[in-house]
C-alpha cells in the first residue's frame, strides 16, 4: 500500500488532465489523490506468485520475464507512481498522460512495444458512476490502472489465475489475460441493466395506473443513468472491434476468436440501453399526456359548473341592481311582488335545468372524467398482465 496524506471527505475529488499550454505528455499530480495499491500476479502453467507490493522496484525483482506478469494499480491518481511504472516498462508519455486524465473515451492505440487500451467500467456504489480502466498489453505482461481505489469486477479472473488445473488463462499468454479483463468489464454491465429493466417495468405500471410527481423524477434519473451507460459502452464497441479486426503482434488469432464473444456482448448491451432509453422516453410522454388529459378533465368539470351557475348569477345580478320602483313603475316592479323572491329562485332553477339539458343533448357532460379513469385502470391491468407474461 502506497500511503498518501488523508483527504477530507468534504473536498471534492478533482479530475484533471494537463495544464493549458503544457508540453504533450506532461504528467500533473493530483493534489487530492488518495492512497493507491499495487497488486501483481506472476504466473505460468506450473507456478504462480501473487503479492501486494509497496514499491515499483519490487516488480523487477519478482518478474522472471518467462512468465506472464499482471500488475494492477488500484487508484491511479499519483503521477509519481504512474511515472515510475511507465519508466520500468517503457510506456510512452502520451499514453501515461491519458492514464492520469480520466476523461478518455474507450479506445485502442498501438505503440512500439505495447498495446494501449482504455475502457470504462462501472464503479461499485449506490449511484451509477463509471471509472477509467487503462490497460497496457505487451508480449508477456499486462499493466492495468484503475482510476479510483475500491472494488473491481476482476475477482473471478483472479480466481481463474489461482486455479492450477483446467485453467486456460494459466497456459495462455498476456493477450488472453487482457481479453479476460475486458470480458469482465463488459459482463459487469449486465446486472446493472437487468436492474434498470425491473425498475422500468415497475414505473410503467405506476405511470399507467395513476399520476405521481415522484415517478417522473425517477424517470428522469433513469434516463440520465442510461445516457451515462451509453457514453461508456458505444466507444467500447469500436475499441473491441479494433482489437478484433486489426492485425497486431500483441493479439493472437486464437484470442481474436474470444474477442468476437466480447463484441457480441457489447452489441447486446447497446441494444438493451437503446431499448430502455426509448421505453423511458415513452413512459415520460405517457406521463405528460396523462397529466395533460387529467388537467383537461378538471378544466372541463370546472367550466361546466361555472356555465351552469352563470344564468343564476345573471338573474341575481339583475335583481341586485338598486333601481327603486318608487321613482318609476318600470324600475323592477318584481321587487314589490308578494312572491317575487320565490319567482327569482324558480327562474334560476328553471334556467339551470335548461342549461343541463342542453349540455346533455350536446354530449358535453360526458362522465366528468370517470371514463378516463376507467381507461387508465384497464390499461394498467393490461400492462400488469404483460409484465406477468
Image (cartoon, helix red, strand yellow):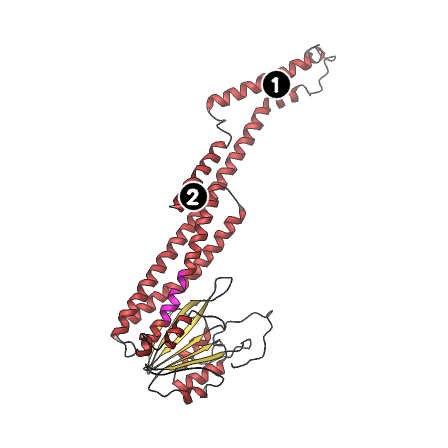
Can you give x and y, in whole percent of width and height, for residue 323 in the image?
Answer: 71, 17
Q: Is residue 158 left or right of residue 166?
A: right
Task: Kindly state the secondary structure of the residue where label 1 is placed.
Answer: helix
Disc 2 residue crowd, few under 14, some 14–19, many 20+, Cα 10 Å: some
Can you give x and y, in whole percent of width and height, for residue 2 in the image?
Answer: 52, 82
Which residue sits at x=48%, y=35%? 373
* Mark linked to residue 110: none
Task: Kindly state the secondary structure of the residue where label 2 is placed.
Answer: helix
Looking at the image, is 316 positioned above or below residue 179? above
Disc 1 residue crowd, few under 14, some 14–19, many 20+, Cα 10 Å: many
Magenta-highlighted stretch: main secondary structure? Answer: helix
Which residue sits at x=47%, y=55%? 222
Is residue 331 in sight in this rendering?
A: no
Which residue sits at x=47%, y=48%? 203
Q: Residue 282 versus residue 94: which sits nearer the camera?
A: 282
Which residue reaches farthest right? 326
Is residue 156 in sight in this rendering?
A: yes
Q: Is residue 387 left or right of residue 28?
A: left
Q: Which residue is the site of mark 2?
A: 384
Alpha carbons under labels 2 and 1: distance apart: 49 Å
Q: Is residue 155 magenta?
A: no
Looking at the image, is 11 positioned above or below residue 25? above
Residue range (magenta)? 181-190
Which residue reaches farthest bottom? 61
Q: Is residue 186 magenta?
A: yes
Sequence-wise first label, 2 or 1:
1
Q: Nearer the viewer, mark 2 or mark 1?
A: 2
Q: Which residue is the site of mark 1?
A: 348
Which residue sits at x=37%, y=53%? 275
Can you give x and y, in whole percent of width and height, for residue 221 in the image?
Answer: 49, 55
Q: Are marks 2 and 1 in contact (CB under 8 Å)?
A: no
Q: Residue 67 versus residue 205: which sits nearer the camera?
A: 67
Amino acid at each position: 500500500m502506497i500511503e498518501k496524506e488523508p483527504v477530507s471527505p468534504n473536498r471534492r475529488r478533482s479530475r484533471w488532465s494537463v495544464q493549458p499550454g503544457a508540453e504533450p505528455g506532461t504528467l500533473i499530480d493530483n493534489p487530492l489523490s488518495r492512497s493507491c495499491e499495487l497488486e501483481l500476479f506472476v504466473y505460468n502453467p506450473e507456478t504462480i506468485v501473487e503479492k501486494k507490493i509497496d514499491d515499483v522496484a519490487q516488480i523487477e525483482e519478482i518478474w522472471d520475464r518467462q512468465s506472464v506478469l499482471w500488475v494492477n494499480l488500484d487508484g491511479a491518481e499519483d503521477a509519481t507512481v504512474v511515472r515510475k511504472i511507465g519508466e520500468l516498462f517503457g510506456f510512452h508519455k502520451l499514453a501515461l498522460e491519458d492514464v492520469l486524465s480520466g476523461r478518455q473515451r474507450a479506445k485502442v492505440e498501438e505503440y512500439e512495444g505495447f498495446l494501449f487500451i482504455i475502457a470504462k467500467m462501472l464503479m461499485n456504489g449506490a449511484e451509477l458512476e463509471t471509472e477509467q480502466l487503462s490497460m497496457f498489453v505487451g508480449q508477456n505482461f499486462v499493466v492495468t490502472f484503475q482510476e479510483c481505489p475500491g472494488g473491481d469486477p476482476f475477482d473471478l479472473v483472479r480466481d481463474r489465475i489461482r486455479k492450477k488445473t483446467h485453467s486456460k488463462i494459466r497456459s495462455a499468454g498476456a493477450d488472453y489475460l487482457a481479453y479476460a479483463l475486458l470480458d469482465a468489464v463488459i459482463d459487469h454491465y449486465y446486472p446493472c441493466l437487468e436492474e434498470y429493466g425491473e425498475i422500468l417495468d415497475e414505473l410503467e405500471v405506476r405511470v399507467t395506473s395513476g399520476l405521481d410527481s415522484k415517478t417522473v423524477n425517477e424517470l428522469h434519473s433513469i434516463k440520465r443513468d442510461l445516457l451515462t451507460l451509453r457514453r461508456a459502452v458505444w466507444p467500447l464497441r469500436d475499441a473491441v472491434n479494433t482489437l478484433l479486426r486489426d492485425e497486431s503482434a500483441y493479439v493472437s488469432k486464437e484470442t481474436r476468436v474470444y474477442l468476437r464473444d466480447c463484441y457480441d456482448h457489447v452489441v447486446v448491451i447497446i441494444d438493451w440501453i437503446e431499448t430502455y432509453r426509448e421505453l423511458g422516453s415513452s413512459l415520460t410522454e405517457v406521463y405528460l399526456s396523462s397529466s395533460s388529459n387529467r388537467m383537461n378533465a378538471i378544466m372541463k368539470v370546472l367550466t361546466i359548473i361555472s356555465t351552469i351557475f352563470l344564468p343564476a348569477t345573471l338573474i341575481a345580478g339583475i335583481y341586485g341592481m338598486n333601481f327603486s320602483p318608487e321613482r318609476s313603475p318600470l324600475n323592477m316592479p318584481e321587487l314589490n311582488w308578494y312572491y317575487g323572491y320565490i319567482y327569482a329562485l324558480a327562474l334560476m332553477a328553471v334556467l339551470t335545468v335548461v342549461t343541463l339539458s342542453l349540455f346533455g343533448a350536446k354530449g358535453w357532460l360526458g362522465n366528468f372524467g370517470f371514463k378516463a379513469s376507467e381507461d387508465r385502470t384497464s390499461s394498467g391491468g393490461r400492462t400488469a398482465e404483460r409484465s406477468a407474461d
